[in-house]
Amino acid sequence: MLFRSGLIWKVDETLEALPGALDLKEDLLDGSKDYLSQLKTEDPADDGLSREVAVTYSKLGTVKSEMGRLTEARDNFERALSINQALVVHDSINGLYELDLATNLQELGTIDLAQGKPDVADQHLAKGLAILQQLNTALPVHEAVRLHESIQRELAKIRLDRKSTR
């Protein structure tokens, strides 16, 4: 199967370096999202496929965000979040699902900041940080620490912004 083999992710990474490739990335990701969503509904017990759909929504959210289409980005990040929440409930010992969930919360927090919603961003980022703190011993240090530091920076920015507006 084309998408499950990871080819779409290789194509996406190759496009990353090309200037002006956002529209093409959007088309590729939209197509893969539609295809994976169809497969997902046919086999709801396939966690791996559900994760691929969530990752596709997340990547599409990133592309939409880069294009300045924040409402569409939020919609995709929220869809990824919903799938990842279900995956964590289904397999609560899989740290990768929890890391994906924390990443989605960070993505939503970033969109919240861009849309001028620091209080909502603070909630999303704090939830993501709490997940990462629980995972810190279970995941490879470099992944958890990198995301942890990024969330910390976002939280610090929110807090500084709040202080400067008071």
Image (cartoon, grey):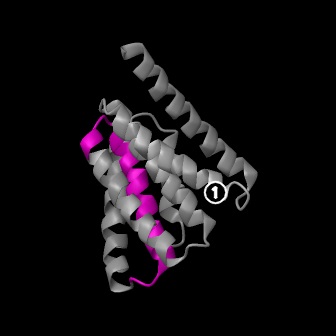
Q: Is residue 145 left or right of residue 99?
A: right
Q: Is residue 133 left or right of residue 38?
A: right
The residue lying at 52 percent from left, 39 percent from top is 17
Where disc 1 sits, the SS reads: helix
Which residue is disc 1 drawn over? 134
Q: Quadrant of residue 64?
A: top left
Decide: few, some or many residues near mark 1? Use Cα within 10 Å; few <14, some 14-19, many ≥20.
few
Q: Main secondary structure of the magenta part?
A: helix
Could you say where residue 138 lies in the image, as x and y percent from the top left?
Answer: 71, 62
Front residue of 27/78: it is: 78
Could you say where residue 155 lies in the image, as x and y percent from the top left?
Answer: 51, 33
Q: In the rendered image of this protein, does residue 108 appear above or below residue 19?
A: below
Q: Quadrant of residue 22?
A: top left
Could you say where residue 93 lies in the image, as x and y percent from the top left?
Answer: 61, 73
The region drawn magenta spans: 44-71
Residue 133 sits inside the magenta stretch: no
Quarter of the image containing the C terminus? Answer: top left
Residue 49 sits inside the magenta stretch: yes
The residue lying at 35 percent from left, 40 percent from top is 120
The residue lying at 34 percent from left, 55 percent from top is 78
